[in-house]
Image (cartoon, rainbow, N blue to C red):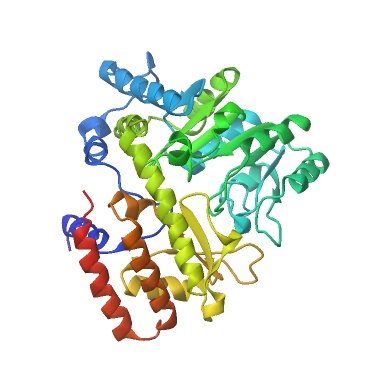
Amino acid sequence: MTTKKLIQSEIKRQQSTINLIPSENYPSKAIREAVGSLLMSKYAEGYPAKRYYAGNKVIDQIENLAIVAAKKAFGADHANVQPYSGTPANLAIYSALANPGDRIMSMSLSHGGHLSHGHKANFSSQVYKFVNYGVDEKTHQLDYAEIRKLARVFKPKVIVCGATAYPRKIDFKKFAEIAKEVNAYCVADISHIAGLVAAGHHQNPTKYCDVVMTTTHKTLRGPRGAIILCKKDLASKIDKAVFPGFQGGPHLHSIAGKAICLQEAKSVNFKKYIKQVLTNTKLLAEELKSKGFKIITNGSDNHLILVDVSNFKLTGKVATEALEQAGIIANKNLIPFDHKSPFEPSGIRLGAAAITTRGMKEREIKKIAQWIYEVMVNYTSKSDLSKINKEVKQLCKKFPIK
């Protein structure tokens, strides 16, 4: 099969399935056109007006547009829009703020943090000494008093806040206060909630934290990539860490896509979209709770929920495989204090960002929750899963990816 046919097959799969993976979304046609443009053929090592290649007059204007849009969207002093993705961006930040062997404090992966926040399998842990904080065993929410105690004992050079599987709001102001007490830099990773921050529904960490990193392809609905925001006094350190520290030529087609998505994030329609994402997520949690699912933290303040499926006698792996057969795409996920392995965890992670982009609202959320329940209780029945799959396809036809 040719690459072209495989791409067409993937487009068909996406159009005919319900995507509940919180880290995925659908960018606008304008963004897709920018990412697929001839901008990908240009080299532009360096920064606007300070390039190592000729022919970058227009390119400088595009990158400056992205920088201005990023600063405006988040009220930041400085923005670097060149990072290829979240993990390279985080590594660049660590490099700018700490020396090899320095101590960094971050959220445990198993409690909701990210691989690049010092997990033992990630390169970051080979360079820096990480200690992890987690969530309270009863509430499964962040305990800032305990985090403060750990910071006072560990005395880190950097404290990282932000998560990939934490359904509640994060108090960035408190994290910044803790960091200041122990003379540490405070870094916020808002990759998942950036759209919620830009729309004014979550606390803006640029007011409190020294550096803020976000990817642009989740709730921001942009291209794959990342941006770094920081205070003025750290601008030079951050820029040098990104280029030439960790990257060569920037991906200009992606930067153009970032400029568009950041401009879109200030629109009235985007604010309405984020409001619907929050409504859909809360309703999905409530509907699943009413059907016997255990929802971690008993609800959500953002675009995702974490679900313990063990009371259905399933692992997250079995649950997501059965859901996929039914046309519903989710991801298996550890839950806090999980006794199972990351490959066979107790939970699944569900998000409403992508389906909300397609235009689905409360009525559709109730259907989706019912289908998830039916999959869990009939996961061994191929006929039942096939029946749901047909119903899913019919719904997806009414809400095409545009």
- Report x, y in % for residue 100: 68, 36
Seen as rendered, the residue at the extreme top is: 49
Using the rendered image of the protein, determine whether residue 218 is visible from the camera's viewpoint: no
Q: Residue at the location (37% across, 65% down)?
A: 366
Q: Quadrant of residue 40?
A: top left
- Report x, y in % for residue 212: 54, 33
* Front position in the image: 99 or 146: 146
- Report x, y in % for residue 20: 39, 60
Which of the image's four quarters has the N terminus?
bottom left
388 relative to 227, above or below? below
Indicate left or right for 360 with 304 as reference. Answer: left
Q: Residue at the location (35% across, 41% down)?
A: 272
Q: Residue at the location (36% across, 20% down)?
A: 64
* Front position in the image: 374 or 43: 374
Seen as rendered, the residue at the extreme right is: 153
92 relative to 348, above or below? above
Q: How many marks?
A: 0
Indicate left or right for 121 with 179 as reference. Answer: left
- Report x, y in % for residue 191: 48, 42
Using the rendered image of the protein, determine whether residue 216 is visible from the camera's viewpoint: yes
266 relative to 85, above or below? above
Q: Quadrant of residue 21?
A: bottom left
* Front position in the image: 329 or 99: 329
* Front position in the image: 142 or 103: 142
Indicate left or right for 95 with 320 as reference. Answer: right
